[in-house]
Image (tube, helix red, strand yellow):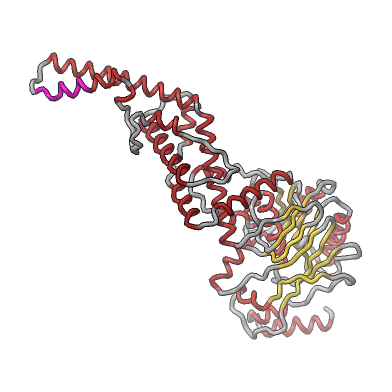
Amino acid sequence: MLWKVKTLDREKLFEATGFKFIINELDLKTGFGRRKLKELAFMKEPGLIEKELEELSVFIKHFSDESVLEKLKQRLSLLKDILGTIERLKQGEELDDIDLFELKDFLLTYEDLRENIQFPEFLPKIVANELLNLLDPEGLKLRNFHIYSAYSSELTAIRQEKRAIANLSQAKDDIQERIKTLKLKEMELEHKIRQKLSKEFRDNIEKITAIVELIARIDFLQAKAVLVQKYNLSRPMLSTKTVRFRGLFNPEIKEILRPHHREFQPVDLLIKKGVCVITGANMCGKTVLLRTIALAQLMFQYGFYVPAKEAEMVPFEGIFFFSGDYQSYKKGLSSFAAEVLELKEAIKHVKERWLILFDELARNTNPDEGKALVSSISEFFSNSCCYTMITTHYSGIAEKGLRHYRVKGLREKLPEKLDSPVSLVEYVDYSLVELKDELGEVPHEALKIAEIFGLDKEIIKKAKRKLLKGE
């Protein structure tokens, strides 16, 4: 499938590249932080990316003490979502006691957070005491709310008279009538106080919104900081010409392998403007590599650290991820006709700086035509402004002028039998070898893999005989 970052259906893009896994791993503590996910912007300007990465770096250093970071997370988790209340204020509605209680609880928790946790200097300092005092006229900082007598001397007098009458033993009609009158006056005054409070908060809606945005920012930063620690991500350096990875790895695959006591083998890679072809036998990690490159680029341009020991990265105008092996993420394969339509879409951007990732192009057509087509596409994109990577199991694609990597593939010592694809990981060398002076034959390893996984021996023998005969 073909995905570009400016597509409206980001969920499909995130799933196809593995970025959804990263998003799901964010341990956000507030509803404000979770809503911020929907506002994530794909950044193209180097200055914006650098600012985001620098702020994350400062945040990580500021909260290097895990106990302090844990206190921050605990306090963030206590903050209730007040976006519904804010929306009612914007609509001009009068807040009821529940709304006002939620506002008070929110402001109390925020002030407790602000007073007990020191924030990094780059974050704005917003004091909410004046707003809190509107809902806490007695200054007791109790986590409850009602229309306090302290709001009005007239209300105080009415309530005192109500209490005095309630202590009288007689239940004369005139006393009962007086109680009704006092209750009506009390309700009227309470209504006016709610109206006044609603207006006060409506007049301060920008400040309330700024506090919410600050909390969302802090929550998002802490979640990204925790992710850096959990997966040992690194801060990428901005580059103007080349993308370079040392020790690139895939966090999701790493987690999948962990229960099986297997390790993901990191990869070193250099990507330049033009075309780079990656060849290798099936099941040797080409598709995972391409997805990992797409994932790292997305993380970089969304302001995350990336899964590599070191990285230099170029901001692109957009990303095309063209995968012929999307069935592992979504059932079904695109037809060759659909691939051609998507390819036409990618060609529209040959004069722009895009990252183009083609995974196993033309695998759904016959080998002779497929090989010719992939070779022609490689030559076409070599003259574009794009940074293009093409994975293929076809031999002889990387012609003169194209950079060529080959996945090393199966190791020399292989077991006689394996039961699951995960077990194959330790017998494959996923490192890349750059080929300088050869077109590069793709290793013929399919029969070896089929044999290890116990395919019928008679089928294996017949296949080997056909290869020897050149059939």
Check if residue 372 falls in the magenta segment: no
Q: Eyeballing the image, is 53 above or below 137?
A: below
Quadrant, the C terminus? bottom right
Q: Nearer the viewer, residue 43 or 210?
A: 210
Residue at (52, 57) in percent of width and height: 65
Residue at (72, 78) in percent of width and height: 410
Q: Nearer the viewer, residue 50 or 27?
A: 50
- On the question of residue 80 being in view, the answer is no
Residue 230 percent location from the top left of the image: 56, 61
Q: Residue furthest left?
A: 170
Residue at (53, 71) in percent of width and height: 259
Residue 275 percent location from the top left of the image: 84, 59
In the displayed structure image, the side of residue 114 where residue 228 appears, left or right? right
Q: Nearer the viewer, residue 77 or 409?
A: 77
Q: Eyeballing the image, is 178 above or below 441?
A: above
Q: What type of secondary structure mainly makes up the magenta span?
A: helix
Check if residue 163 falls in the magenta segment: yes
Q: Which residues are magenta?
A: 160-168
- On the question of residue 181 being in view, the answer is yes
